[in-house]
Amino acid sequence: MTDFYKIGQVIEVRGQKLRIRVFENKNSNILIYNGQIIKNVSVGGFVKIPKGFSNIIARIEGEYIQENCDKNAVRFSKESETIDRIIEVSIMGVLNDRRFQRGLIDIPLVFSDAYILTDQEVRKIFEFSSDMSTSICVGAINDYKEEKLYVSANSLFASHIGIFGNTGSGKSNTLAKIYTECFQRFKELPNFAKSRFLLIDFNGEYTTAFDDTKRVYRLSTRVDNGDQIPIHRTFLEDVDLWAIICEATEKTQKPFLGKSIDLYKKLREIESLSQYIRGMLNNLFLRFFDNPPMFLKQLTNIKLLLEVLFVDTSSAVALLNSIQIRGQEPCFFRVDNGVNCWGNTVDEYKNLFVTPILDSLFTDANCKPIDEYLVFEFALRFKFLESLCSQFVNEEHIAPLLSRFDNRSKRVKRLFRICDNPPLDWLAIYSLVDVNVEFKKIVPLIICKYFYEKQRQDFQGHSLHIIIDEAHNVLSTASERESQTWKDYRLETFEEIIKEGRKFGTFLTISSQRPSDISETIISQLHNYFIHRLVNNEDIRAIGKAVAFIDNTSYEMISVLPQGACIFTGVASNFPVLVQVDLLPKNKQPQSTTVNLVQMWKE
């Protein structure tokens, strides 16, 4: 290499850390060589130190000046002749045979020459992927703005990704950018359909982003005409999820839920369900014969049970309301068209009370169309009454569970549609902007758990990519609005995905403003990080503790990064890189821009 690129000499070697004295004529911002402008060395840039047949590559971490103590110097010489510029560098690796290899492979000697890198050598250092056809472009490298950063798609997307930054720092654009690049470059490949992508969008920012063939689910807990997520009925058979939805207590209510779900499973296997349910109701009414006071006490719950299955219950309710308990040994009594009906024996009770009630209900036009939610609610209410008759449960313990089920099952029906063969969307965006606070943590948990379990069971060369924007909403460890049991279950579910998901082709991408709120286990298990500006000390410390791939220089820059710039580090990069992420076209950008108040006021 020409001596023009030589900028100084090594004057001190301390392991990985070096000090280089820069020549007097190489202290300007730019250098001109053969009519070309060459950027001079500065903090964040690289220098090359030849040794043998290899070139040691070092990164500049700082610089300072020191007085030249040369005894032969003229007493009144110029300042530039008595002060040396010193740069401190850290060895990054070796550039050998036009290929960069990271690590402390060789150490230079004192008085070794240091050189500026050529454009071609810079490209080799930032060439994180050996095959450019399978790489995506993230943006421009800040210290070498004419160079673009390309990252191996396999190293990036076959990993867990973390995108962190304060609001307005550009993290939403980064998330949209990397996945838009992925879809544009690889979607047309013959087996791209083997990968599925689902995005949890808390603020509705990504409904217009990415590919036009995506499926957007605009979920709502407030209205009945919102989109519903198609899901298999195994969702209804998950005791843990229903325990979370209904806030079931561990000792009494959760076991009751488990028995109700067992009954639901049994009912789904019955061919002639209507006749079987009639037999169940007949047996339930007969159970009340030995306990008439219990019958009167549970009359309201009996009516609610019948309303689950039948369109018109007015005749049955009228019969139920006419029943009285009389006699020293309580027995059933009612008046039918002026005739006194007594239920002194089981047969009389069945013929004069039970059978008329059931006959008024079980007509072809009166039975509601059977669906999964209807059968599930019937199983729950029937099990409650049956358990009370058997004195297996205490009404005061289970009644609050039913009350919460009544309230929350309505929202569950608005959000999830049960079907035998749910369609498989290659890219699904679940917008939770119209979902109430109570369900904003439950819905992402259900979605992620359901699809992860499905992927784990059917893992045959397929991949599942779960993307969670504003992940602190569902991965927070500091929430005080929920029980400890629910919080533990939620975090354990996502920790299992991030710990074990890779074995089953499941990869998690999280984006958040508050990394300090997220479980340390989850952050530490991420493989690649895009770190935008963070100003909160707790957030910065959380990154420093969990991210093993970041150096001190990059760590100190986190709080002063400009908008759109981020530190990219992880297994897909040889070292931390400061990159200015490319801005997507307007029609592909997430809807997260800050409102222009003055423009709004003018309009």
Image (tube, rainbow, N blue to C red):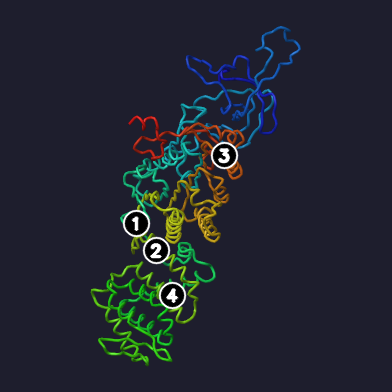
Tell me the mark number nearer the camera, choosing from 2 and 1.
2
Residue 313 drawn above or below residue 435 = below
Look at mark 4 in the image and give the residue it sits on.
384
Instruction: Report the Cα–Cα distance between label 4 and label 3.
Output: 51 Å
Residue 93, numbered circle:
none
Crowdedness of circle 2 by 10 Å Cα count: few (<14), some, many (20+)? some
Tell me the mark number nearer the camera, choosing from 4 and 3.
4
Look at mark 2 in the image and give the residue it sits on.
409
Residue 191 drawn above or below residue 590 = below
Q: Amino acid at mark 4?
A: Phe
Crowdedness of circle 4 by 10 Å Cα count: few (<14), some, many (20+)? many
Look at mark 3 in the image and give the residue it sits on.
536
Considering the numbered disc 2 on the image, is that residue within a helix, a strand or a loop?
helix
Residue 32 drawn above or below residue 125 = above
Numbered label tally: 4
Q: Amino acid at mark 1?
A: Gln
Q: Position of residue 419 (x, y in %)?
A: 33, 63
Look at mark 1 in the image and give the residue it sits on.
228
Q: Amino acid at mark 2?
A: Ser
Q: Earlier in the sequence, mark 4 or mark 3?
A: 4
Residue 482 in view = yes
Instruction: Report the Cα–Cα distance between label 4 and label 2.
Output: 17 Å
Q: Earlier in the sequence, mark 1 or mark 4?
A: 1
Q: Residue at x 71, y 16 (%)?
A: 68
Q: Position of residue 170 (x, y in %)?
A: 46, 37
Label 2 close to label 1 by CB (< 8 Å): no
Tell me the mark number nearer the camera, choosing from 1 and 3.
3
Residue nearest the observer in this picture, 306 or 396: 396
Q: Position of residue 9 (x, y in %)?
A: 65, 22
